[in-house]
Amino acid sequence: MRPTVHDIADKAGVSLATVDRVLNGRPGVRAVTRAKVEAAIAALGYVRDVAAANLAKSRIYPLVFILPEGDNPFMRELEAEVRRAGLHSAAERTQLSVVTVPAFDAAALAAAIDAAVAENVSGIAAVAVDGPEVFSAIERARAAGVPFVTLVSDLAGSARDHFIGVDNIAAGRTAGSLMGRFLATRPGPVAVLAGSMRVRDHGERLEGFLAAMSAMLVARAILPVLEGQDDPELSFSLIAECLAEVPDLAGLYSLGAGNRGLIRALAAAGRTDVCVIAHELTAETRAGLESGLVDAVLNQDAGHEVRSAVRVLRAKADGLPVNAAQERIRLDIFIRDNLPAEPDAVDPSAAGGN
């Protein structure tokens, strides 16, 4: 039979109220008394059922998702998935909210993290930007007892609790392998379009891509990275200029967003001969696959990532273990022949506030 709080109180010779204060880390208990209670807990092998305790208290978990604003279809899909999850949050005793900050702005992200901590949230999930101010903000969140997970783009050297997203180096290697196979012995250089090299996922994807391309039997030039800031107009200008200046361009790897501009530039130039590999199955990349302007899309499930973030943050808030296998995000590869049916539209204003 499992020991109870009554057993702890009897063994330590204290009241149930004192046991409760020790278990919940509340003040008002002398050090010697706290030591007696902790010794009784250890001697009895008591393991607290935190989830049951929180259920009995009807605890609500306020969780905040900090996402980049702007014209990035995948980020807007993540936001829609948070709203969707918010529709069912009452039953799961969570309260989900979304805060948006300027894309690739480390200072703005750090300020948003600090603001969330000040509001006593139970957990934070954020698309990370590499910068010392972000590392410091994550440390402050953890020092305040607020669990923190990185979403899509990781900061492995930070104090974050968990990363939720695909293995971005493996994703880049996959893109490089596909590019090499699709081009075979065809000559010509390959261009790379990124959003910003200030985010780790773009850097890691590039690392994997270059490694895979260097291992191909046919050596080919990889042009300097074009940074489109995930902006379709800037991406259009960069790709249009590249196509004009490099008429023998053989391939193009888009490792971030900005694909609307990329596809428009390819269509305007009539360049269906360029092998294009992109990330995230959005309306733009789907249309590109269907028209033949895009050859393959590597995709991660935004819904799975949001649900995983909620599960991990709740587990961390309760001091419970994380089921790593359940939280592993899969990388899917889509070509024109295996496109899934289009999902139903999600109204991003259906639930939750900013």
Image (cartoon, rainbow, N blue to C red):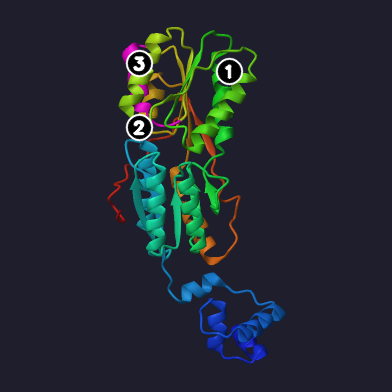
Could you say where residue 55 lies in the image, as x and y percent from the top left?
Answer: 47, 72
- Other-residue count near label 2 (Cα within 10 Å), few / some / many at <14 / 14–19 / ≥20: few
Is disc 1 surrounded by few (<14), some (14 to 19) or many (20+) residues within 10 Å?
Answer: few
Residue at position x 46%, y 59% from top? 123
* Residue under label 3: 240
Tell me if residue 137 is in the magenta stretch.
no
The residues tagged by marks 2 and 1 sit, at their Cα atoms, a distance apart of: 26 Å
Say which amino acid is labelled 3: Ala
Q: Mark 2 falls on what kind of element?
A: helix
Residue 114 position within the rendered picture, expressed as x and y whole percent measured from the top left: 40, 56
Eye-nearest disc, 3 or 1: 3
On the question of residue 174 being in view, the answer is no
The residue lying at 47 percent from left, 29 percent from top is 255
Q: Mark 3: which secondary structure?
A: helix
Q: Which residue is mark 2?
A: 283
Asked if the residues shown at circle 2 and circle 1 are in contact, with their CB atoms under 8 angstroms apart, the answer is no
* Magenta highlight range: 256-270
Q: Give me the residue at 72% from left, 80% from top.
A: 43
From the image, which quarter does the N terminus lie in? bottom right
| Residue 159 falls left or right of residue 40 | left
Q: SS of the residue at dot 1?
A: helix
N-term-proximal mark, 2 vs 3:
3
